[in-house]
Amino acid sequence: MDASRIRALGAFADLPLTELDELAAVMNDVEVAAGVKLVTADDVGHYIYFVEVGEADVLTDDGTVAETLGPGDAFGEIAILVTGERTATVIARTPMSLLSLFDPDFQRIRPRVPEFERSISRLGSERLSQ
């Protein structure tokens, strides 16, 4: 994977090139069709996802749409960094292209990507406070 794809995700545009290269070496492409359930609340979470193309709905416990995610957004960080479990259900609204980061890969490179970790930690903290 090319680091420029990660840089194109707005939240990571200012990451040092060394961190972008570390991430590019372990991230994978994921293509999903509209209607696919990407994550389910209370399941164990093993991936952080980054939206390149498409939209996904974040559902509340009663199934209403709390938020719509689009290009540049991420989800799954709370399970990886804090709880170990998904805090919401996310369903693809449209066909999507995602980048995924597997938790064991993240843990392996974690010491070498401090700015990335700060960025996703900030995102997770904001979501938990809502």
Image (spheres, rainbow, N blue to C red):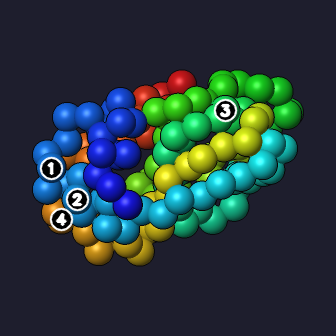
Query: Mark 4 to mark 1: distance in Å?
Result: 15 Å
Can you see residue 114? Answer: no
Query: Mark 4 to mark 2: distance in Å?
Result: 14 Å
Q: Are marks 4 and 2 in contact (CB under 8 Å)?
A: no
Q: Are marks 4 and 3 in contact (CB under 8 Å)?
A: no
Mark 3 and mark 1 lie on one chain; the one further toward the N terminus is 1
Q: Do the residues labelled 3 and 1 touch (CB within 8 Å)?
A: no
Query: Mark 2 to mark 3: distance in Å?
Result: 26 Å
Mark 4 and mark 3 lie on one chain; the one further toward the N terminus is 3
Q: Are marks 2 and 1 in contact (CB under 8 Å)?
A: yes
- Which kind of residue does numbered mark 1 sit on? Leu
Where is residue 3 drawn, in percent x and y? 29, 52
Where 102 falls versus 61 (above or below)?
Answer: below
Mark 4 and mark 2 lie on one chain; the one further toward the N terminus is 2
Where is residue 56 drawn, in percent x and y? 69, 35
The residue that mark 3 highlights is 55
Residues packed near mark 1 inside 10 Å, few (<14), some (14 to 19) or many (20 plus): few
Can you see residue 27? Answer: yes
Where is residue 111 drawn, in percent x and y? 18, 65
Rendered image: mark on residue 21: 2
4 or 1: mark nearer the eye:
1
- Which kind of residue does numbered mark 4 sit on? Pro
Residues packed near mark 3 inside 10 Å, few (<14), some (14 to 19) or many (20 plus): many
Is 62 left, or right, of 82 in this rendering? right
Rendered image: mark on residue 17: 1
The residue that mark 4 highlights is 111
Query: Mark 2 to mark 1: distance in Å?
Result: 6 Å
Who's the residue at 19% across and 54% down the image? 19
4 or 2: mark nearer the eye:
2
